[in-house]
Image: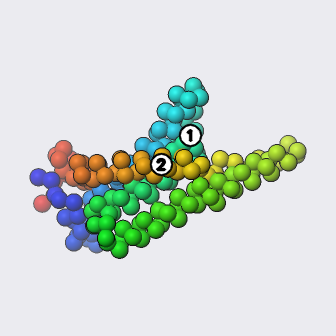
Amino acid sequence: MILPAGLLAPFHDARPLLAVFDNPVLWWGLAACGVAQLSKLVIELVVHRRWNPRVLVETGGMPSSHSALMTGTAAGIGWQLGFADGLFALAATLCFVVLYDASGVRRAAGLTAERVNGLARDPELKPLKQNLGHTRLEVLVGSLMGPLVALPGLALVGSPLQLAQHWGLVALG
């Protein structure tokens, strides 16, 4: 038997680990982030024709995994609680801040680092990291990936705990 999403909510104080694994919004938001990061590796292979697994842990690039995480999580909260709920409003507001920061502040910091690195002539100085932010297109693609991964996962699969129950790995009684 699969428990409905949120059934462990009354027990979250007594069984916090189970409650975390019964939170499909969290896991599908993280899954959207992971899909965005993995797609960077595929893009690196297809576009640049090179194997570069470092893109899996680097910031910046196409698509924005931060944007996918935030929009996937915000869409999941809206799906689960309703798009008129105050928590969705909070999630959407935080989402806008992260998206603006990624394409504005962090991008500007990366461009500044590029200029500073061009001025530095001392070989002992470690160059500043340049790929900090995202272009607007990278943020847009990440923003679309988030709900495209999270919402079907929420609607069709549920939480990791629900999957474990379905596969007979966990029996809660």
Q: Position of residue 148 (x, y in %)?
A: 36, 47
Q: Is residue 170 above or below residue 97?
A: above
| Residue 154 percent location from the top left of the image | 27, 53
Q: CA distance from mark 1 to mark 2?
A: 15 Å
On the image, the x and y values in percent for residue 142 come to 47, 48
**Outermost right residue:** 121
Residue toward you, 48 or 7 = 48
Q: Is residue 108 above or below residue 86?
A: above
Considering only vertical position in the picture, is 55 above or below 79? Answer: above
The answer, for residue 95, to whether it is visible in the render is: yes
> Is 171 on the left-hand or right-hand side of 45?
left
Drawn side of residue 71 relative to residue 60, left or right: left
Callout 1: SS: helix
What residue is pinned by disc 2?
Answer: 142
Q: Residues within 10 Å of mark 2 (few under 14, many from 20)?
A: many
Give the residue at x 42% y 71%: 90
Left or right: 159 as drawn, with respect to 134: left
Q: Earlier in the sequence, mark 1 or mark 2?
A: 1
Count residues near mark 1 (Cα–Cα under 10 Å), then give few for <14, some for 14-19, many for 20+: some
Could you say which disc has been placed on residue 111 in the image?
A: none
Residue identified by numbered label 1: 55
At label 1, which amino acid type do we have? Val
Give amino acid for label 2. Answer: Gly
> Which residue corresponds to the image point at 15% horizontal and 53% vertical from the top-left?
2
> Is 37 displayed left or right of 6 in the figure?
right
